Every structure is written in structure tokens, then in C-alpha cells.
Image (cartoon, helix red, strand yellow):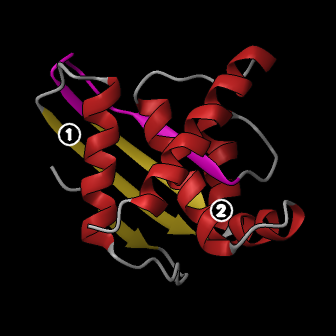
């Protein structure tokens, strides 16, 4: 099932959405083979928009690059909303000396990995999450189909 991409008062510059959507579907198939349907919505937004969501839904008063809401109600159907701050992605690309596009894809993959059950609160979990992000990013860059 295709992922949906929306922009809230920003331009993400995201390209090849059909290819990316198919790749995201492949991530879900790899890590959650029993899932029959997948409905993931990505919303690209500003720092301020995501900060308000962070305050209202998670009671955190900090900027973040991503918030993932798992709306799944059965083991066979994966559903989620992923909000990504384009401002944070741009800033993080500079901080981590990478391209904006690579950082955007990394965060997109980070969100779907959360929906697939990966955590990142503990240091051990962060390492596993980063390894999987790197793997997805590498595979996406190699797969030109």
C-alpha cells in the first residue's frame, strides 16, 4: 500500500514519491511479514508546528525532527502518522555533515522503523535503530528501480 506524503506550510523537496512509497512498503514487509495492509501518512511541517504537537500530545516542550503515531489496531494492518520537521532535517543535515536528501530519507525510514517496533530510548536500542536506518538508506540509494 502506498505511503502518503503531505506538506504543512513547507516544501520538502521530496522526489520520487512512488519509488519511496514502494521502498517503505518493502521495509514493512521485511520487518513485519504478517502485515497485510499498510497505511502510513507522512506530514512534513515546520519546527513550530511539530513543537506544538510535541507539547499537546507528548507533553514535551522541545524541538524534535520527528513524531510517530502508531494507530495500528490489529496485527495484520499497520497504520500510522509520521510528522517530520523540515527545519530540523535541514539543521541536522548541517550538524551531521550529510546532505539534506540523505537526512530526510533517514528520518522517513526512522519513522517507519518505529512503526515496525524499533525503539530508541535506550542506548542499546539507539544503536540498533541507527544500524537499521543506515541499512535502509544504503539499500534505497542502491535500488534505482
Question: Whole-percent x and y of residue 78?
Answer: 25, 31
Residue at 82% across, 47% down: 62
Magenta stretch, residue numbers: 65-78
In which quadrant of the rendered view does residue 55 lie? top right
In which quadrant of the rendered view does residue 42 lie? bottom left
From the viewer's perspective, is residue 140 above or below residue 38? below
Q: Earlier in the sequence, mark 2 or mark 1?
A: 1
Q: In this figure, which residue is indicated by the disc labeled 1?
A: 38
Q: In this figure, which residue is indicated by the disc labeled 2?
A: 103
Estimate how packed mark 1 is, as few (under 14), some (14 to 19) or many (20 or more) residues with alpha carbons within 10 Å: some
- Is 99 left, or right, of 135 in this rendering? right
Residue at 72% across, 26% down: 126
Using the image as rendered, state which of residue 109 and residue 131 is in the foreground: 131
Camera sees residue 3: no
Q: Secondary structure at mark 2?
A: helix
In which quadrant of the rendered view does residue 96 lie? bottom right
From the viewer's perspective, is residue 106 above or below residue 145? above
From the viewer's perspective, is residue 101 above or below residue 122? below
Question: Whole-percent x and y of residue 10?
Answer: 55, 81
Tag in front: 2 or 1: 2
From the viewer's perspective, is residue 88 above or below residue 29? below
Task: Pick the quarter of the image with the C terminus.
Answer: bottom left
Amino acid at each position: 500500500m502506498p505511503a502518503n506524503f503531505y506538506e504543512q506550510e513547507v516544501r520538502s523537496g521530496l522526489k520520487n514519491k512512488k519509488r519511496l512509497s514502494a521502498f517503505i512498503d518493502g521495509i514493512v514487509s521485511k520487518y513485519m511479514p504478517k502485515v497485510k495492509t499498510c497505511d502510513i501518512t507522512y506530514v512534513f511541517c515546520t519546527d513550530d508546528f511539530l513543537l506544538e504537537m510535541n507539547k499537546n500530545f507528548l507533553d514535551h516542550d522541545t524541538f524534535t525532527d520527528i513524531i510517530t503515531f502508531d494507530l495500528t489496531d490489529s496485527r495484520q494492518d499497520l497504520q500510522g502518522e509520521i510528522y517530520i520537521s523540515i527545519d530540523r532535517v535541514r539543521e541536522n543535515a548541517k550538524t551531521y555533515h550529510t546532505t539534506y536528501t540523505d537526512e530526510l530519507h533517514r528520518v522517513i525510514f526512522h519513522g517507519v522503523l518505529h512503526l515496525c517496533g524499533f525503539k530508541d530510548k535506550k542506548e542499546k536500542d539507539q544503536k540498533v535503530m541507527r544500524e537499521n536506518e543506515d541499512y535502509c538508506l544504503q539499500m534505497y540509494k542502491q535500488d534505482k528501480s
